[in-house]
Amino acid sequence: MAETTKIDLDLKVKRSVQVYDTSFLNGYDLWVHGFCNKYAWKCPTERLIDQYRDLTSQNHLEVGVGTGFLLDKASLDPAERRIGIMDFSRNCLDYSSRRLKRYDPELYHHDILKPFPENYTSRFDSIGINYVLHCVPGEFSSKGKSFGNLKSLLSPGGVLFGSTLLGAGIKRTAIARALMWGYSKFDIFSNHADSEHALRRSLSQHFTDVRIETVGCCALFEARR
Ligand SMILES: C[S@@+](CC[C@H](N)C(=O)[O-])C[C@H]1O[C@@H](n2cnc3c(N)ncnc32)[C@H](O)[C@@H]1O
């Protein structure tokens, strides 16, 4: 990739996470998991929490942790559980590490579009990545390389799971269309070309067993090596 294009992408990634470095984070749970999931995205928050209850292992990395809402609400037993939390926003890492203190989390400040240095950390048996991919600039043909990067941190037989909001190939309510339009205008979302098909193709480049279920605008996925 040409140097200027790389710099452009870095700037876009910085812009897309800027909003999480503000006091918006204090109202995030109520707005996103309280209002938008139900009225705009049409995917019940309970559905996301269930996925975390089902698939979070004893050795788990949470990517794009935000406020830490889902791990918190999944009410997992902290005993002998290793939890890593990763985000490109320092504010999110500070906020969620306080909330998830009972897990004594390992903190990773990293942009998932960047490969991980060799021996970055020991591997995880599950990796959760919820509502992150629709924020990452580009289409799945380019942002899908984050799956390859994360795969390098996943144990053989481990599972990568989460969900993302699709912008193509789904029925959207008027409120969902208006919100996605506004978020895209401010570079918070980048999902206008994201379809279930594109997500499946991208995951299948890195994983052998890929399952996706779309509920409203939300594609819930799990992928195994
Ligand atoms: C919409 S929030 C989702 C928060 C949480 N996972 C949830 O479901 O409530 C997106 C999160 O992903 C992080 N993020 C966005 N792009 C990222 C990137 N390229 N690398 C790492 N984290 C990123 C943001 O800082 C933010 O914490």
Image: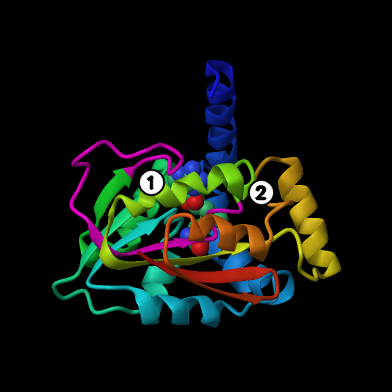
Residue 127: image quadrant is bottom left
Q: Is mark 2 within 8 Å of ligand 1?
A: no
Image position, residue 197 (x, y; %): 65, 63
Residue at the image position 73 percent from the left and 46 percent from the top: 184
Q: Residues within 10 Å of mark 2 (few under 14, many from 20)?
A: many
Question: In terms of secondary structure, what is the magenta stretch mainly?
Answer: loop
Q: Is mark 1 within 8 Å of ligand 1?
A: no
- Mark 1 residue element: helix
Residue lying at the far left in this picture: please name it. Answer: 80
Report the residue marked by disc 2. Answer: 189
Residue at the image position 82 percent from the left and 57 percent from the top: 178
Mark 2 → mark 1, Cα distance in angstroms: 21 Å
| Front-most of residues 49 and 171 | 171
Amino acid marked by disc 2: Phe
| Front-most of residues 71 and 3 | 3
Residue at the image position 68 percent from the left and 40 percent from the top: 187
Amino acid marked by disc 1: Asn
Q: Earlier in the sequence, mark 2 or mark 1?
A: 1
Image position, residue 222 (x, y; %): 46, 70
Report the residue marked by disc 1. Answer: 149
| Front-most of residues 206 and 164 | 206
Q: Which residues are magenta?
A: 109-134
Q: Residues within 10 Å of mark 1 (few under 14, many from 20)?
A: some
Image position, residue 94 (x, y; %): 35, 48
Q: Is residue 111 above or below residue 130?
A: above
Image position, residue 192 (x, y; %): 74, 51
Q: Is residue 2 above or below residue 43?
A: above
The circle drawn on residue 83 is none
Tell whether position 171 is magenta: no
